[in-house]
Every structure is written in C-alpha cells, then in structure tokens.
Amino acid sequence: MASPRVVVYPPDSSGGRRVRADGEILGMAYRPADVIEFLRRAGWDEHLFAIDDARMIDWRGGGPDDWEPR
C-alpha cells in the first residue's frame, strides 16, 4: 500500500497543525476546513477524498478532531 500523500502534523503550542502534501508544506491549519482549503488550492478536488481517509491523509498526533495546543 502506498503512503498517504498528505501529512498533518501534531498540534503545536497554538493548536496549529502543519500540513504537507506531496512533499510540499501547504501551511498551518487550525481546523479541518483549513486542511481542505490548502488541498483545494494545491489542486485537489475536495469531492474526491475524505478528510478522515487514512489512505490519503496521515493525521499525526491525533485525528481531524484534535486541535488542542500542546
């Protein structure tokens, strides 16, 4: 099985999570909608993936509902 193309890193001290897709840093997300927007801007069709699809998105340090500062 191929590795996920998107990595969402654990929340930092402000609750932001760095988002990387295909090796490129897309930005700092503060909610799931930010992740979707970054991917849309990178050319992804938001209708072709699910935010909780582990085959496409590797949520490190908690899933799409975990935004607590660390």
Image (cartoon, rainbow, N blue to C red):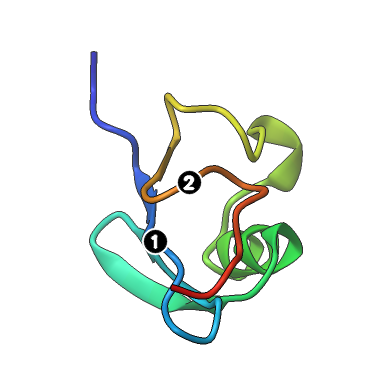
Mark 2 = which residue? 62
| N-terminal label among 1 and 2 | 1
**Which of the 4 image quadrants contains residue 51?**
top right
Query: Who is closer to the viewer here, 7 or 49?
Result: 7
Extreme bottom residue here? 14
Check if mark 1's residue and mark 2's residue have beta carbons within 8 Å.
yes
Image disc number at residue 54: none
Does residue 57 sit above or below 39 in this rendering? above
Crowd tier of the residue under label 1, counting other residues whose Cα lies within 10 Å: few below 14, some 14–19, many 20 or above: many
Quarter of the image for the C terminus: give it. Answer: bottom left
| Residue plotted at (55% across, 27% down) | 53
Kindly report the distance in space between the C-alpha atoms of the residues bearing marks 1 and 2: 7 Å
Extreme top residue here? 1
Q: Amino acid at mark 1?
A: Pro
* Residue 39 pos. (x, y %): 57, 60
| Residue plotted at (33% across, 35% down) | 4
Image disc number at residue 10: 1
- Along the horizontal axis of the image, is 50 left or right of 24? right
* Residue 67 pos. (x, y %): 61, 64
